[in-house]
Amino acid sequence: MNDKNTTSSSLKDKVVLITGASRGIGESIAIGFAKEGAHVVVNYLTSEEKANQVVKACLAYGADAMAYQADVGDLDACQKMIEHTVHEFGQIDALVNNAFAPYTFDPDSRKPFWEMPLESFEKQWSGSLGALYNTTQAVLPHFRSQARGSIVSIGSNLVHRPVVPYHDYISAKSAMIALTKTLGTELAPLGIRVNAVCPGWVYPTDSSRSSKELSRQALQVQTPMGRLATPQDIVGPVLFLASEWSSFMTGQVLYVDGGYTMPNA
């Protein structure tokens, strides 16, 4: 990352909207874009105070930033959010889909499949696949009129290696990855790129904070780099996929987990 006012990044003066950006991974991503000179829209659902704190942190790097409350599960709300972004900044260059339905990553407290109601699946499908559908539908008119744009979604390495069978969460993230690839195929001729970043277990976040130390240690032992991911570890790959540095990449999935899902071949 470059220091304030010294950036030569391809993200300088770009306009980026990050959903679920008031905390955790989303907060780190928003600040990461600001450090590179991008103008940032911090989407949030209920955490207005925290979102404003993220905006303040972004402004400290000299870029413009604003918070915007919207439920990404609501298509009309997403359309209004995109329209407001374009009205305020004159354009939108990248969309980062980070928001998802609340979830707790704790192997000891998860429900087995035979105790899991369909509603659990529907909640996660809406939070991942539904949110990607809504934000993409809302941003596409602007990306198509510009003949350019980048969409980056946050998935999970569990879609590749479901070491803990979080059935509802993993099935939803798997659908998100599938839609990322089909959108990448259809939108590429229009100058629009669609990619995803799949982190490993990120700690600490609101979803992982209650996990037991023994579970985290077991995962660390199996990770070639010997530790869990932090929210800051996810920033660089997202910035890369949102920028012109990855201009010939679409429909791709980057696994950011310290080598945990390293291919065998």
Image (cartoon, rainbow, N blue to C red):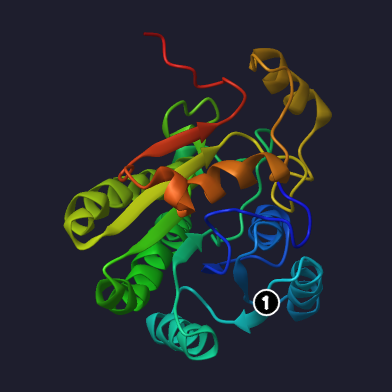
* Residue 12 appears in view: yes
Q: Which residue bears the numbered disc 1?
A: 65
Give me the residue at 63% from left, 76% from top.
45
Where is residue 189 drawn, in percent x and y?
Answer: 17, 57
Which kind of residue does numbered mark 1 sit on? Answer: Ala
Q: Position of residue 73 (x, y in %)?
A: 45, 74
Q: Which quadrant, please, contains the C terminus? A: top left
The picture places residue 149, in percent across and down from the top left corner, at 36, 64
Q: Nearer the viewer, residue 160 or 263?
A: 263
Quadrant hosting residue 88: bottom right
Q: Which of 17 and 108 is in front in this view?
A: 17
Left/right of residue 242 with respect to residue 67 in the rendered view: left
User: Is 36 left, or right, of 194 in this rendering?
Assistant: right
- Quadrant in the rendering for residue 18: bottom right
Element at badge 1? strand
* Residue shown at the point (42%, 15%) measured from the top left: 263
Picture coordinates of residue 194, whole percent (x, y): 34, 53
